[in-house]
Image: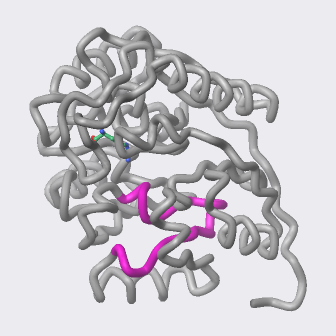
C-alpha cells in the first residue's frame, strides 16, 4: 500500500430503484434463496427506504420504477439494464421467473427519454454483470450473462468491454464479487474468478482493494461508491477498514432481508448515466 492516503472525490449520481412492495422468496435461482425460509416484506421495505434516504442525504438523485406484482426480484434494479451515455441496454434474463421484468424496464426507459433503448439479444443481466469503470466496462459471465452479450454491449456503447469469468455459484453476478470504487479503482474477491480473469484484474488494477472470504460471504462486494462514500453491509468489517486506508468513507447499510433473495445494496441500485 502507498504511504499516503489518496484524496477521493464524490460525484453526484443518478440512480434507479424499485421499492420491494412485492418482495418474497418463492423460487430459488441462486444459492442464497431458500423458499422455505420466511421473508418479511415490511422489513425489506424499511431497509430499502433507509438505503433510498441515504442516497438522497448524500446528494444523489433517485428515480423510481413501479414494482410489478408477481415479480419479487424486481427490487434488484441493477439487473434491469446497463446505462451509459444515455443509451440503455435492457436485460434479457436467464430464468423465466424474471423474464417479464425486461418489459417493465424497457418501457421505463422509453418513457424517460433515453436516446437508445435496446433489449439485449443474448442473456444479459444488466449491471449485475456489467460494471462501468470510467470508460471501460467489466463484464461477468459464467452463471448468468452470456459472453455474446458482452460483445453486444461493446458494440452499443463503443467502449472496451473486458470479459471476466465467475466460478463460484454463490457469486453468480459480477456485482457480488467486484465493486467499482472510482473511475480507475475497484475492489474484488479474487477467488470468485478463474485464473485468467484474476490475472486480467491484477494487470488492469494493480492497486485494487482485495476482499477476503468473510467479507465476500456477507456481500461486502455488493457495494455502491460515489467516488468517495462507499455503501456496504455492516458485516463487512475488514473491508470497511481497507476502504478507509484507501481514502474512502465506508457507510454501513443493513439490507439483511434483501440478502435472502441473493442481493444487497448494489443489486438494488441501477446507475443512470444520461
Ligand atoms: N434473486 C435475484 C436473482 O437471483 C437476485 C439478483 C441480485 N442482483 C444482483 N445485481 N446481483 O436473479
User: In the displayed structure, does residue 207 sit left or right of residue 2?
Assistant: left
Give how far across and how far down residue 198 sits, in percent.
38, 84
Q: How many labels, in total?
A: 0
Q: Is residue 186 magenta?
A: yes
Q: Nearer the viewer, residue 118 or 219?
A: 219
Question: Does the magenta-highlighted stretch encompass residue 185?
Answer: yes
Residue at the spot x=37%, y=47% of the render? 128
Residue found at x 33% / y 25% = 24
**Residue 69: x, y in percent?**
29, 9
At x 60% / y 29%, what residue is drawn? 47
Left or right, residue 141 beside residue 273:
left
Q: Nearer the viewer, residue 109 or 61?
A: 61
Q: Quadrant of the image for the C terminus?
A: top right
Pinpoint residue 86: horizontal percent, then vertical percent. Answer: 47, 31
Assign ligand 1 to one image quadrant: top left
Using the image, determine if residue 153 lies above or below residue 248.
above
- Magenta segment, which residues? 174-192
- Spot occupied by residue 174 in the image (x, y as percentages of width and height): 37, 59
Amino acid at each position: 500500500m502507498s504511504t499516503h492516503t489518496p484524496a477521493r472525490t464524490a460525484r453526484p449520481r443518478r440512480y434507479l430503484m424499485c421499492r420491494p412492495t412485492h418482495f418474497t422468496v418463492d423460487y430459488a435461482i441462486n444459492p442464497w434463496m431458500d423458499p422455505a425460509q420466511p421473508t418479511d416484506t415490511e422489513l425489506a421495505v424499511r431497509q430499502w427506504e433507509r438505503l433510498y434516504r441515504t442516497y438522497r442525504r448524500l446528494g444523489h438523485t433517485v428515480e423510481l420504477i413501479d414494482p410489478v406484482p408477481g415479480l419479487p426480484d424486481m427490487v434488484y434494479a441493477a439487473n434491469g439494464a446497463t446505462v451509459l451515455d444515455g443509451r440503455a441496454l435492457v436485460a434479457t434474463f436467464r430464468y423465466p421467473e424474471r423474464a417479464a421484468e425486461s418489459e417493465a424496464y424497457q418501457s421505463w426507459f422509453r418513457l424517460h427519454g433515453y436516446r437508445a433503448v435496446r433489449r439485449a439479444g443474448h442473456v444479459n443481466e444488466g449491471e449485475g454483470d456489467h460494471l462501468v469503470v470510467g470508460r471501460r466496462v467489466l463484464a461477468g459471465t459464467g452463471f448468468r450473462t452470456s459472453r455474446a452479450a458482452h460483445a453486444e454491449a461493446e458494440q452499443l456503447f463503443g467502449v472496451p468491454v473486458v470479459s471476466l469469468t465467475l466460478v463460484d455459484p454463490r457469486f453468480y453476478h459480477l456485482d457480488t464479487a467486484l465493486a467499482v470504487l472510482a473511475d480507475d479503482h475497484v475492489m474484488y474477491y479474487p477467488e470468485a474468478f478463474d485464473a485468467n480473469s484474476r490475472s486480467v484484474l491484477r494487470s488492469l488494477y494493480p492497486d485494487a482493494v482485495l476482499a477476503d472470504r468473510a467479507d465476500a460471504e456477507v456481500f461486502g462486494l455488493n457495494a455502491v461508491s460515489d467516488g468517495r462514500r462507499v455503501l456496504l453491509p455492516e458485516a463487512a468489517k475488514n473491508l470497511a477498514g481497507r476502504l478507509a486506508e484507501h481514502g474512502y468513507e465506508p457507510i454501513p447499510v443493513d439490507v439483511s432481508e434483501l440478502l435472502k433473495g441473493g442481493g444487497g445494496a448494489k443489486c438494488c441500485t441501477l446507475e443512470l448515466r444520461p
